[in-house]
Image (cartoon, grey):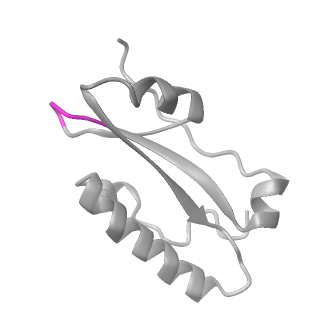
Amino acid sequence: MQTPFETRPIISSLDIRRGYVKRYFTQMNSTRKIYEIDKDQYAVYTTDPNYTTISLSWIIDATDPTDTSIKNTNIIIYYNKKMPGLSRKLRNPFQYIGG
């Protein structure tokens, strides 16, 4: 299997209306390197025992940016337990706020 390639989420009008965007990550178990990937890659790497994968709902609602930042910080803390090192990948809890 080839190495995952990094992607960034594309924020759609549906994402903006619902206030979040789905983000997908995979981590190579042997190197612990984390890649942000798309939904198609996520489907592939979820079945590969050499990788750990997670998907999360990243809040982008700009109604209260401080509250959104706190929610995203909590998301980072929670998923960092499942994928150690994710907090280094997701350093900016304000990322994508407002679409």
Please tell me which residue is depicted at 20% across the width and 34% down the height of the picture. 29
Say which of 99 and 74 sits in front. Answer: 74
Quarter that holds the N terminus: top left
Is 5 left, or right, of 99 in this rendering? Answer: left
Residue at the far front in the pictured view:
47
Please tell me which residue is depicted at 56% across the width and 35% down the height of the picture. 38
Q: How many marks?
A: 0
Is 68 left, or right, of 86 in this rendering? Answer: right
Please tell me which residue is depicted at 29% across the width and 31% down the height of the picture. 51
From this view, report whether residue 24 is shown above or below residue 79. Answer: above
**Bounds of the magenta segment:** 27-31
From this view, report whether residue 62 is shown above or below residue 98. Answer: below
Please tell me which residue is depicted at 69% across the width and 45% down the height of the picture. 10
Question: Is 29 covered by the magenta stretch?
Answer: yes
Question: Is 26 covered by the magenta stretch?
Answer: no
Is 2 left, or right, of 36 in this rendering? Answer: left
From this view, report whether residue 95 is shown above or below residue 38. Answer: below
Is 76 left, or right, of 23 in this rendering? Answer: left
Residue 53: image location, x then y, percent: 37, 40
Residue 20: image location, x then y, percent: 66, 63
Residue 70: image location, x then y, percent: 48, 83
Which secondary structure dominates the residues rendered in magenta? Answer: loop
The quadrant holding residue 81 is bottom left
Residue at the far top in the pictured view:
1
Quarter that holds the C terminus: bottom right
Residue at the far left in the pictured view:
30
From this view, report whether residue 43 is shown above or below residue 59. Answer: above
